[in-house]
Amino acid sequence: MKAAVLKSFGSPLVIEDVPEPVLGTGEVIVDVVATRVLSYSNEVFSGERKYALDLPVIPGAGGVGRVRAIGPDATKLSVGDWVLCDPTVRSRDDAIAPDIHLQGVSARGEGGMQLQKYFHHGSFAERMRVPTENVTRLGELSEAEAARWSVLGTMLVPYGGFLAARLQPGETVLVSGATGNFGSAAVAVALAMGAAWVVAPGRNEKMLAELVRRYGARVRPVKLTGNENDDRELMKRAVPAPIDCAFDIMPPSVATTVVRAAIMTVRPNGRVVLMGGVNMQGGPGLELPYNWIMRECITIHGVWMYPRDSAARLIALVRAGLLKLEEYETTAFDLDHANEAVAHAAANGGPFKITVIRP
């Protein structure tokens, strides 16, 4: 089959023929129809992000496709089914604290690297092999719709954060990083889950206005000043109710003071979700006052990715019309132009945009 292969960090992807994946028990082989290109893929492939990725590798984080072959443990899947492939591969021999590998992206720890050696290749290929539990049926859709459904890979990240915080309908949410790719998806997901208000702080006034235009008055924009204390009060006053949950998805380049200002807006007994990149590339860590956490009974959730059943639940929100994929502008490339797709994703990684490869 044809695939895009990363052979060394800092080198372009090589488009070449590689052996097809071989089906084993507990696995599914999927014909990849559309796979999103992460906006920071160029940083991963250059080595800038220092992700644990054993080379050479076919990169690519999950995707949308059709089932080509199934193992004997699959009782609901059929050949030809449209499915979403989740790149979050978990070890099966520890239900409480499984090792995790993001297929085609990176691994966490020694156990994650061991997983990567087997579920090694990602979705920048005509076919991929994934664990059976990482495949979720999408229902009927057309070839043209496949690229749009790839955006679920972005939406699943904040959805996992809100599930961890047990977000309830009618609650007020603050999204730190709302004008970014994952942050704008978090705004959409929070509203789909029934949030009464979503506070959206940022400095990009054009995008703040765009969030309000798309989602209405339930989104409350806040133009940040750069002063931590002033910004905290502006965010609190943006809504007529206490902030129940603060969700952070800021990238590594953002100052910790910006993140702390947002986090400390939550009410007593409030919840905080940390899914961003603060301190990922060194520098000062996030300092939160011990007394504030203790006296205000604040719950802090560190969340990486999402539970295994999240894809099915999120698909249901889309099918119910609560979460709209039509909001996203999709640009597609074929596999021969995978390097151009990576460059396009880096240059167009903002909200409501998705770059896909269609093998």
Image: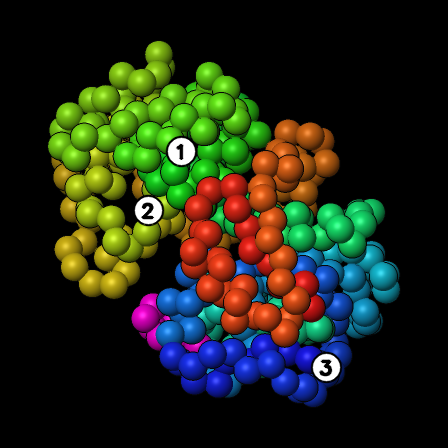
Report, in whole angstroms, how far the alpha carbon at label 2 lies from the one at label 1.
16 Å
- Residue 294 in percent (x, y) is at 20, 35
- Quadrant in the rendering for residue 293: top left
Task: State the SS at label 1.
Answer: helix
- Residue 354 in percent (x, y) is at 55, 50
Sequence order check, earlier mark of 2 and 1: 1
Foreground of the two, 156 or 142: 142
Q: Which mark is residue 207?
A: 1
Task: State the SS at label 2.
Answer: loop
Q: Is residue 31 visible?
A: yes
Q: Which mark is residue 1?
A: 3
- Residue 214 in percent (x, y) is at 52, 26
Sequence order check, earlier mark of 3 and 2: 3
Left or right placement of residue 175 versus residue 287 in this view: right
Residue at figure coordinates x 38%, y 74% from the top left: 46
Instruction: Please name the residue that numbered disc 2 is placed on.
Output: 250
**Badge nearest the viewer, 2 or 1:** 1
Mark 3 is on which residue type? Met
Sequence order check, earlier mark of 3 and 1: 3
The 10 Å Cα crowd at callout 2, few under 14, some 14 to 19, many 20 or more, is many
Magenta stretch in the rendered image? 47-53
